[in-house]
């Protein structure tokens, strides 16, 4: 091992004998100093990071983040298992195909067009008196199906 350090190749040889070894050691030294200053500021400072690590509010934030990530893990697990509306849509291909078929035929479906128009009219009234639902047009021989 000592021979390899002396004769090279390798990082240890470069640090001890190489031309850039002093620069590399200096860089490591600067990184160490910066890390020491950062840790000192973290322990003794008044900043947000100090509060997050050592303060009461930091403990609450950490606990809340743990709860949120735990809840998200449960939600994703349930969705992957097909539970709930979103899970069913993600897992069950027949639901996807049905939704695609319905939404794809909206332009040709007179009933859905009437419902969309009624919903838009309701939204425009913003809490006023509700209008009667529109009459659903009956398909005529000339209209496309």
Image: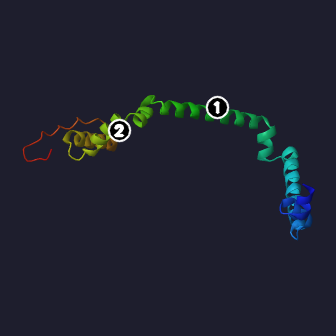
Residue displayed at 36% across by 41% down: 126
Residue displayed at 49% across by 33% down: 80
On the rendered structure, is 83 left or right of 9? left
**Between discs 2 and 1, the one toward the N terminus:** 1
Mark 1 Cα-neighbour bin, 10 Å: few <14, some 14–19, many ≥20: few
Q: Quadrant of residue 82?
A: top left
Residue displayed at 91% across by 59% down: 3
Report the residue marked by disc 2.
96
Label 1 SS: helix
Is residue 88 depicted above or below 109 in this figure? above
Report the residue marked by disc 1.
67
- Foreground residue among 125 and 82: 82
Q: Say which quadrant the N terminus sits in.
A: bottom right
- Foreground residue among 5 and 119: 5
Q: Position of residue 35 (x, y in %)?
A: 85, 53
Count every numbered label the image shows and give the total. 2
Q: Quadrant of residue 123?
A: top left
How far apart marks 2 and 1 lie (CA) works out to 32 Å
- Foreground residue among 9 and 92: 9
Label 2 SS: helix
- Residue furthest out toward the front: 3
Q: Say which quadrant the C terminus sits in.
A: top left
């Amino acid at each position: 091992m000592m021979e390899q350090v002396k004769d090279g190749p390798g990082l240890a040889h470069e640090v001890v004998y190489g031309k850039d070894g002093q620069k590399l050691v200096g860089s490591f030294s600067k990184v160490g100093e910066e890390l020491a200053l950062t840790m000192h500021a973290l322990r003794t400072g008044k900043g947000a990071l100090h509060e997050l690590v050592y303060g009461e509010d930091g403990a609450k934030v950490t606990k809340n983040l743990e709860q949120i990530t735990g809840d998200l893990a449960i939600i994703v697990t349930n969705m992957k298992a097909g539970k709930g509306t979103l899970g069913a849509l993600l897992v069950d291909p027949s639901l996807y195909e049905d939704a695609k078929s319905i939404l794809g035929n909206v332009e040709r479906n007179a009933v859905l067009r009437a419902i969309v128009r009624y919903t838009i009219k309701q939204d425009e009234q913003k809490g006023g008196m509700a209008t009667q639902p529109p009459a659903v047009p009956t398909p005529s021989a000339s209209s496309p199906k």
